[in-house]
Structures are given as structure tokens and as C-alpha cells.
Image (spheres, rainbow, N blue to C red):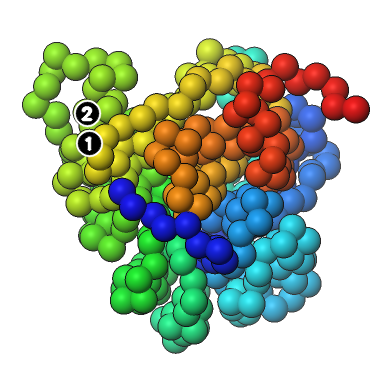
Amino acid sequence: MEYRPTSMKRVVTFGELLLSLSATGNRRLVQADEFVARYTGAEANAAVSLAQFGVEANVVSKVPEHEIGQACVNALRRFGVNTDHVVRGGDRLGLLYMEAGASQRPTKVIYDRQPSSFRQLRPDDLDWDAVLAGKDWFHFSGTAPAAGGAVVEVLSAGLATARRLGLTVSCDCNYRSKLWSMEEAGRVLAPLLDRVNVLICGKDDPERIFGVQSERPDLTGQDRNEHMAELTRRRFNLDGVAMTFREAPSASINRWSALLCHRDGLCRSRQYEIRVVDRVGGGDAFAAGLIFGLLSGFEPRRTIDFAAAAGCLKHSIPGDFNLVSREEVEHLLAGNDSGRVQR
């Protein structure tokens, strides 16, 4: 897998922007009398993280013209994300409500995303040649085509343009059962993978979403995961498949690791044991770390280590944005994981 380092890294992400309303503390939604308002979106979360690493991160989406839409755009600009290609129109920003889990009670999310401005996106809203000119990387996740309708058509046009212009393309499966079924996800995502270079997924996604079947019933555990990653890479002729692993003895304690299967082999990251502050956005932080490593020309082992460390650190930060620098990720990679006060 060959990725040439670039002196000016430019990434474009495409996906829905949302307003997240979270019950304060560890309150349940049924007992909440106030909410913390934040702006989010899987691809926007990755863009914010990339901006902290010094990448030119560009978000493509659609939000209403009113003040809530502007507040969402402002939230991204605050952290260095370019919003020049966020289209204005429609009446409402998608919503999600969240209660943070603890101990044996899981985190819960309720979506209210239809009919949002993003779902009203139309092919003539975007000039993909203008959006992608001079860029290096295009990223989307499964939550974008899950919006259905014309959004899939818009994304397909973007992928075709990205291929014609020579961009590297990544897709994070990011499956959400409350947005669509496994069958529908596979039906929509599989054709899009023809124009994808790097796939990010969970260990069960290849089989459950894409129907990838192994003829090695003797393989279990990590051996089976590695085998499935390689089968997926070969089936879709991908440059790489990155797979994340989360063991969750409880909502408060998680174990986190990843692997990268590429054309020349496979490598795994270390496993982190994490006391969770907020796990939402951890996968997006991983995606950003992976993109950054590959785009920067890191060796595969360093790339997966960087991505896993970036995802690990996100779990320590409230909200969906991974507000850590490249230096802080490198600090963790150097073995500085005691959490001691820096002064």
C-alpha cells in the first residue's frame, strides 16, 4: 500500500451535521430537565480531529439558513474546519438525544433526523469538481448514504469525481441499526466500495453487512478477525481494511485496539484499557488518525498505532470532537499513559 506524503494535506469529508442534545451528568432522558447542546456528525468529527493534526479539513454538507444552521457552522469553524462547501437550505438540522451510560447501563441515542436539510440535498447543490479540486483525500461513513434518496446519488457523483481527480477515498461502515437494516446497508454500501481505497469497519461488519464468508471454521478470535479483514480487502480490491475492536466489560471500562490489513501484510495495535468519559466519537477519531497516518506516509504499523491511540484519547474527552494534537497522540505512543499531571 503506497501513500505518498504531501506537504499540504487536504481532506474533504461528506456527511450529515446534527445538533446533539445530551442529558446532563448520567441522567436518563426521562429524568432530564436540561440538556447540553453540541454539534456533531461522524464525518465532521473526523474533520475536526484532522484539523487538530494540522490538516486542511473541509466539510461538505447541508444545513438550514437560520441561526441554528449558522451555529453549527460556527462550531466547526471554531476548531479550524473549512465550511466553504456547506450548502444552505431546508428547514431543520437533524437532532439526536443522548444519555450517557455508566457501569452496566449502556449509553443510549435517539435520532430525530428526518426530514433534515441534509436529506433534502440534491445533485445540483454541489459542484464536485470545484469541491475536490486540489484535494488529496475524500472520506465518508455509512451514516451519510443511510439518509437515502438523493443523498446516495450526490455521494456517488462525489466518489466518481474523486476517482477521476485521483483522490484517495475512505469509507467507515459506521453501521447504526436505528438508521437502517444490515441488508439495506450492504445493498447500498457494496456498490460504493468499487470507488473506495480504504475501508474502516468493526469485526462483524464484513460478514453481517457484506456477506463475506470464511471457509476456515477452525479460525477463532484474532486469527479469524485477520482472516476476515484479508477476505474483505480482496473481495473489494481495497488498498487497506482497518478493523477496530472494543471489549466492553461495562459502559465505564472498555478495551480498545485495531488492526490494519494492507496489500503487503497485516499489523495490529496495542490494546488500551480505558476508563470512559465519553465514548461517542471514538471511531471517528480512529478514522481521522488512520487517514492522517496514511496521508502522511507513515509505515502501516505506525499508522495503526497512531489511529488506535487517537481513538483511545477521544474516550477521555466530553463531546464528540477529539480535541488532541498530533504531539499528544505521539506522547501516548511513546508510552506516556500514566495520566500524570504535566507541569
Residue 284 position, x and y percent, is: 54, 45
The three-letter code of the residue at mark 1 reads Glu
Can you say which quadrant of the picture contains the C terminus? top right
Mark sitting on residue 230: 1
Instruction: Name the outermost residue toward the left.
Output: 215
Residue 232 position, x and y percent, is: 22, 41
Return the residue at label 2: 227
Question: Along the horizontal axis of the image, is 168 left or right of 302?
Answer: left
SS at badge 1: helix
> Would you place residue 292 above or below residue 209 in this image?
below
Mark sitting on residue 48: none
Question: Along the horizontal axis of the image, is 191 left or right of 61?
Answer: left
Q: Distance from label 1 to label 2 (Cα)? A: 5 Å
SS at badge 2: helix
> Would you place residue 209 above or below residue 244 in this image?
below
- Residue that appears at 31% across and 58% down: 196
Question: Along the horizontal axis of the image, is 91 left or right of 12?
Answer: right
> Would you place residue 147 above or below residue 36 in this image?
below
Residue 230 position, x and y percent, is: 22, 36
Nearer-the-camera pick, 342 or 280: 342
Can residue 34 be seen here? The reply is yes
How packed is label 2: few (under 14 Cα within 10 Å), some, or many (20 or more)?
Answer: some
The three-letter code of the residue at mark 2 reads His
Residue 102 position, x and y percent, is: 67, 20
Labels 1 & 2 near each other (Cβ < 8 A)? yes
